[in-house]
Amino acid sequence: MLKKILLLTVLLGFLGFVCSITPARAQDPVKLRPDIFSVKLENESVRVLEWTFKPGDKELIHTHPEMVIYYLTGGKLRVYGRDGKLLREVDAKAGDTYWYKPMKHALENIGSTTIHAIIVELKTNPFKEYGD
């Protein structure tokens, strides 16, 4: 009986370790942080998110498909890669617009202003019906 308990303890510990190092596989930012991401529109082609990111806020590592971000208000961000390492700092300005390939990342608002942006995530190839 003691062997079974010991084996179960080791197995549960191993599973806990595996889960702790791989928690962010295909994580939806809306599900992870509904307090900062809200869905404004969703259909078979796009999902439009409103993003409100207060000073000091941090996101968990999450994924996005191909997307466009339009900053309504700017701010200073730290961008972390899928491994949690710092990739770069960004000083976004109101009106800045960026296109990104699919990514897995986390962000931190290191500025003194609330960042407010619209994110348009692409779900499909908009030209597929035209044979492209």
Image (cartoon, rainbow, N blue to C red):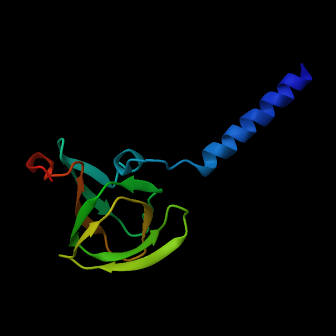
In this view, the residue in front, 89 or 76, is: 89
**Farthest residue toward the left?**
130
**Farthest residue toward the front?**
131
In this view, the residue in front, 132 or 36, is: 132
Residue 60 higher or lower than 13, as above or below: below
Q: Quadrant of the N terminus?
A: top right
Residue 77 image position (x, y, % from top left)? 39, 74
- Residue at image position (85%, 23%) is 4
**Farthest residue toward the right?**
2
Q: Is residue 131 left or right of residue 57?
A: left
**Farthest residue toward the top?**
1
In this view, the residue in front, 130 or 108, is: 130
Residue 52 image position (x, y, % from top left)? 29, 61
Q: Is residue 33 left or right of residue 49?
A: right
In this view, the residue in front, 9 or 108, is: 9
Residue 86 image position (x, y, % from top left)? 52, 73
Q: Quadrant of residue 14?
A: top right
Please count the marks in the image: 0
- Residue at image position (49%, 66%) is 81
- Residue at image position (17%, 76%) is 95
Residue 74 higher or lower than 129, as above or below: below
Q: Is residue 11 left or right of residue 120?
A: right
Residue 8 image position (x, y, % from top left)? 78, 28
